Amino acid sequence: MPAEQQFLPLRLQQGLCDNEPTSATWEDEMAPNQQRGLYDAIFEKLVRSEFSQKSFLPQDDFETLITENTIKEELDKVFGTLDSSLAKYIAKKAPRTFATLVIQDKVLKAMNLEKSKFNDDYLPIANEDSVLTSLNGLSRDGYAWKWFNSWRTQEKNDFCEKQWTFLSPIFESNSMMEVLHRDCRLPFITCDSKREGGSFSFVHKATIHHAHHKISSANLVIAIKELRDTAVGADQRELAALDLARQLQHPHIVKFVGGFRQGPTSHLLFKWADGGNLRSYWNNKKNWSRNADLISWTIEQITGLFSALEKWHDLKLSSTPLNGRHGDLKPENILRSLEAQDSRRGIFQIADLGLAKIHSLPTHARNNPSSTLDGTARYKPPEVKAKISRSYDIWSMGCITLEWIIWLVYGIDELKAFHDQACPEDHDPFWSRDSDDHPTHPVVISWMKYMADTCLVDGEQCYSVALRELLIFVRDRLLVPDPVDHDTTDSTQQSNEDSGLSILITTTPDAKSVTSFSGRAKCNESCMKLRKISSTPNDGRNYMYNPKVNMSGPNGRGPSKPTPSKLQVPSPISSSRQEVNGPLDNR
């Protein structure tokens, strides 16, 4: 990388609009003797940062405008004809410094740049207590600072302010968290007002100028997640998980772009999911119909989400295998991207992996509890007070999958009826609080039994054989309590205040050994089952959807009220389940 770029906070390297500055400050500050030329060319290309509320020069325009030839032309206007050595030095070492002098109308001060050896490596600089300091960490003792000896205080301050026009960051494909000065102008050419982004953040929708990111060649629409936790280091609690998720490059995981901390506030950047979330998708009646294509596509999406979760649960990105889990799966954290070119419906992706935890040992072998900020109560499993394992995510996905089946069979009105019966309050889970063993909620069981006995009954009157198989898998393998407390210590889940958004890589050399027990299905088993369900048999023309089944009567409605469950749920400790699940070494 050229030396003149090494000062940049994010590595400078990409416009929905060519907004001119809304204020008249640039024209007002233009000196009476300013000749038309490079100044005007710069001014005409300025773009307004709707996030920072200031103008910046995009990187591609900077490279076009600030060249050795244009620099020499400006120097010749001021000094007459010069040899080319000064222009060569500036073009190679100090183009941003020179551009700042141009918009200051101080090109005359460029005469001693080469002699003093001041260059862009020192930028950005700040005038703190009447002492100029490089914010890039270069020594204050260097000879180069003598370049400013003859400058008046106002000239120094003006330089410090105008330099930011040319220092907007560029987000690389592997950008992480960068600490930016409060005056740094972010290259976001659109930015809406912030909205609630969950319990721990606000979210902006913004657009990164195409010359200021390395994700694609076009303007990039992003979500800016503004973290509420302003404590120093709080942002680091999310970055480890987000970077690992980015390395997976899984199509069903929302892409992490990068982050920045400006002042006391940290921001995380993600590609914008332009199709809303799964909840809003269900609520839009235009998305629902009864046909094989929708059912087939939905099962593909569920399979893809489980596949992403499988990769996340068993991270194999280094020599040390890591075990991850999400901990807050819910329809609001499953977003729909419409970018997928092979599907008019788009693709669903898991979001908020920044709340996740990473461990180098399975749950049952850890001496320290795994906890995080409370996930959404409705989708928590019965063992919520135990260590949060990857099995926690499977229960949550079981809840979501059951809701999806109900939506596919009946539509949004019946899905809302199910919620009114099973979860009248937002904090009501899919399991019963009325007994110590917390079985699956009777209403949940009654709905699964009702569907299995009516529209999804075994035989020719089955509305969808694929959905019946999926329902039975949810009933028997996902929405079943883990029968054993996998913890081997007396530790309990920490409080929110204690745990924060911790992201840990835990090593426990003296971890206690445990015996294998059966439990709900693991991700790999779920993926295999879902792939099998999605593979339509050659002789199954009505496998996904049977148009001959009458769905206009009782078949087209869920149970009107909760009924006592007589649905047989497999014994949680059956030997057959233990054989299917295998050991709990990836819990």
Image (cartoon, grey):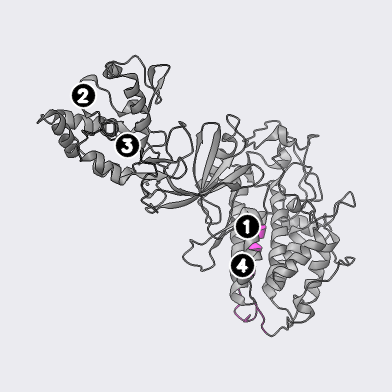
Crowding at dot 1, Cα within 10 Å, few <14 / some 14-19 / many 20+, comes out as many
* Range shown magenta: 524-547
The three-letter amino acid code for the residue at tag 1 is: Phe
The reply to whether dot 3 and dot 4 touch (C-beta < 8 Å) is no
Residue 556 position, x and y percent, is 75, 77
Q: Give the distance between the C-alpha atoms of the residues marked 1 and 4, in whole angstroms.
A: 12 Å
| Residue that label 3 marks | 28
Q: Is residue 319 visible?
A: no
> In front: mark 1 or mark 4?
4
Q: Circle 4 — which element?
A: helix
The three-letter amino acid code for the residue at tag 3 is: Asp
Residue 558 position, x and y percent, is 79, 72
| Residue that label 4 marks | 298
* Front-lying residue, 478 or 497: 497
| Residue that label 1 marks | 306
Above or below, comparing residue 190 to residue 119 in the picture: below
First-in-chain label (1 vs 2): 2
> In front: mark 3 or mark 1?
3
First-in-chain label (3 vs 4): 3
